[in-house]
Image (tube, rainbow, N blue to C red):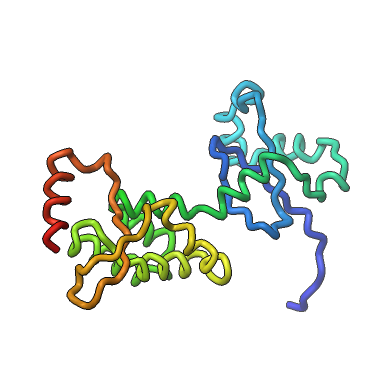
């Protein structure tokens, strides 16, 4: 079929309880983000809306087509405080990955970032072998793979925010490399923490 040009009139509206419902890059020109003080369920019956969409109701589509709108506004990007928050939060999907590492949710991270599977498995192995510690080089490599480019390099200096200051320890028998202690204190009992700290004194 010969190619042809068509006007792009596609728009999508997303409702979410999250402050960062989608990943928004700093240079993004696609998303306008707003906070609605009135819950959507107070305006329309969402169950009926979903059913209408499933059935592709002609009446529903006619109603949508009948809506009046300003084309210039519909195709313009609006700056807002909520958009800034979403952008900042997207830059640090880092925190989400860091928390999943601490909670040992390795498979979830692999599902989100399949290209980084090798890095994640390496960190999992180190955490298990060295009682909650992973090499800073392994963790940095993971975030560079996930974020890519300059953002990956930029975040390396901020990882201590999520894992605490890196510590220099002789755990591998090869010099004294730097390590992050990757653990969520909530999943360790007081006894486990005491035993772990005691063991680490002799490694």
Residue 184: x and y in percent read 29, 46
Residue 47: x and y in percent read 55, 29
Query: Considering only vertical position in the picture, is 132 above or below 40?
Result: below
Residue 10: x and y in percent read 73, 53
Residue at 47% from the left image edge and 55% from the top image edge: 94
The quadrant in which the N terminus is found is: bottom right
Residue 88: x and y in percent read 60, 49
Q: What is the number of callouts on the image?
A: 0
Query: Considering only vertical position in the picture, is 5 above or below 37?
Result: below
Residue at 46% from the left image edge and 69% from the top image edge: 145
The quadrant in which the C terminus is found is: bottom left
Give whichever of 156, 77 is nearer the camera: 156
Give whichever of 16, 118 is nearer the camera: 118
Query: Considering only vertical position in the picture, is 165 above or below 38?
Result: below
Give whichever of 50, 183 is nearer the camera: 183
Query: Considering only vertical position in the picture, is 190 above or below 137?
Result: above
Give whichever of 108, 128 is nearer the camera: 128
Toward which corner of the image does residue 53 lie, by quadrant? top right
Residue at 78% from the left image edge and 49% from the top image edge: 77
Residue at 35% from the left image edge and 69% from the top image edge: 138
Relative horizontal placement of residue 46, taking residue 115 as reference (left or right): right
């Amino acid at each position: 079929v010969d190619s042809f040009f068509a006007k792009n009139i596609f728009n999508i509206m997303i409702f979410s309880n999250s402050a960062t419902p989608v990943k928004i890059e700093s240079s993004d020109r696609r998303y306008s983000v707003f906070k609605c003080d009135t819950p959507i369920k107070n305006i329309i019956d969402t169950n009926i809306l979903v059913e209408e969409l499933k059935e592709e109701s002609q009446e529903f589509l006619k109603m949508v087509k009948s809506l009046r709108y300003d084309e210039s506004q519909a195709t313009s990007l609006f700056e807002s405080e909520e958009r800034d928050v979403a952008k900042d939060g997207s830059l640090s999907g880092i925190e989400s990955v860091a928390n999943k590492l601490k909670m040992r949710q390795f498979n979830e991270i692999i599902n989100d970032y399949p290209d980084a599977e090798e890095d994640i498995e390496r960190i999992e192995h180190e955490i298990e072998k060295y009682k909650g510690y992973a090499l800073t080089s392994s963790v940095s490599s993971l975030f560079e793979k996930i974020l890519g480019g300059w953002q990956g390099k930029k975040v390396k200096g901020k990882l201590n925010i999520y894992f605490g200051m890196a510590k220099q320890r002789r755990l591998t028998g090869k010099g004294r490399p730097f390590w992050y202690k990757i653990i969520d204190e909530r999943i360790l009992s007081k006894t486990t923490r005491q035993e772990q700290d005691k063991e680490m004194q002799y490694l």
